[in-house]
């Protein structure tokens, strides 16, 4: 990915993968564990909790809502333990979430370095 002085948003990160492996009680390879000690991301993370009104299972998401909530809580705790500041996006229309993200970026720009 080319270098940028603008924020770059990722839907998932290697931290999500490691956290999921931990959540499923899977062995985490040492090369992945090492990644957690190397700064790769901004300290500001936006999280969206499971939203019951739009949650559905399908071919890719086969687990029930209750497990999605448990996995989300594990992910949130993991980001906190790794020193990230988590900003929780409330259930809202996409444009409202985008406005919230932009406002947060303006007030917390120091976390983007």
Image (cartoon, rainbow, N blue to C red):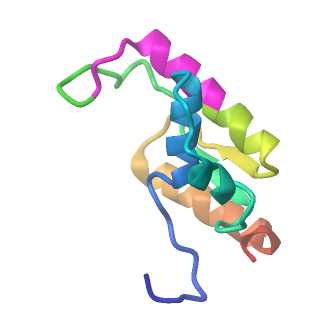
Image quarter (top left, top right, bottom left or bottom right) of the N terminus: bottom left
- What is the x, y in percent for residue 110? 82, 73
Q: Is residue 28 above or below residue 103?
A: above
Q: Position of residue 6 (x, y in %)?
A: 57, 83
Q: Residue furthest front?
A: 30
Is residue 78 placed above or below 12 in the rendered structure?
above
Q: Main secondary structure of the magenta part?
A: helix
Please report the bounds of the magenta region as a residue range: 61-74
Please state the horizontal and vertical placement of residue 28, each as a whole percent of the image: 57, 38
* Residue positioned 71% across, 43% down in the render: 79
Q: Residue at x 78, y 66 (%)?
A: 108
Nearest the camera: 32 or 86?
Answer: 32
Position of residue 73 in the picture relative to residue 65 (left or right): right
- Count the labels in the image: 0
Q: Which residue is depicted at the point 76% across and 73% down?
A: 109
Q: Residue furthest left?
A: 59
Picture quarter with the C terminus: bottom right
Residue drawn at x 48%, y 10% as measured from the top left: 66
Q: Position of residue 4 (x, y in %)?
A: 54, 88
Is residue 96 shown left or right of residue 45? left
* Magenta segment includes 11: no
Q: Is residue 22 above or below residue 38?
A: above
Based on the displayed image, in which of its 4 quarters is residue 35 positioned?
A: bottom right
């Amino acid at each position: 990915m080319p270098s940028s002085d603008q924020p770059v948003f990722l839907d998932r990160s290697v931290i999500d993968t490691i956290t999921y492996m931990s959540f499923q009680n899977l062995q985490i390879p040492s090369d992945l564990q090492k990644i957690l000690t190397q700064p790769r991301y901004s300290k500001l993370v936006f999280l969206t909790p499971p939203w019951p009104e739009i949650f559905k299972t399908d071919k890719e998401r086969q687990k029930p809502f209750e497990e999605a909530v448990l996995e989300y809580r594990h992910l949130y705790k993991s980001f906190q333990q790794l020193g990230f500041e988590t900003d929780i996006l409330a259930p809202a229309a996409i444009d409202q979430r985008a406005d919230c993200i932009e406002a947060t970026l303006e007030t917390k720009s120091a976390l983007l370095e």
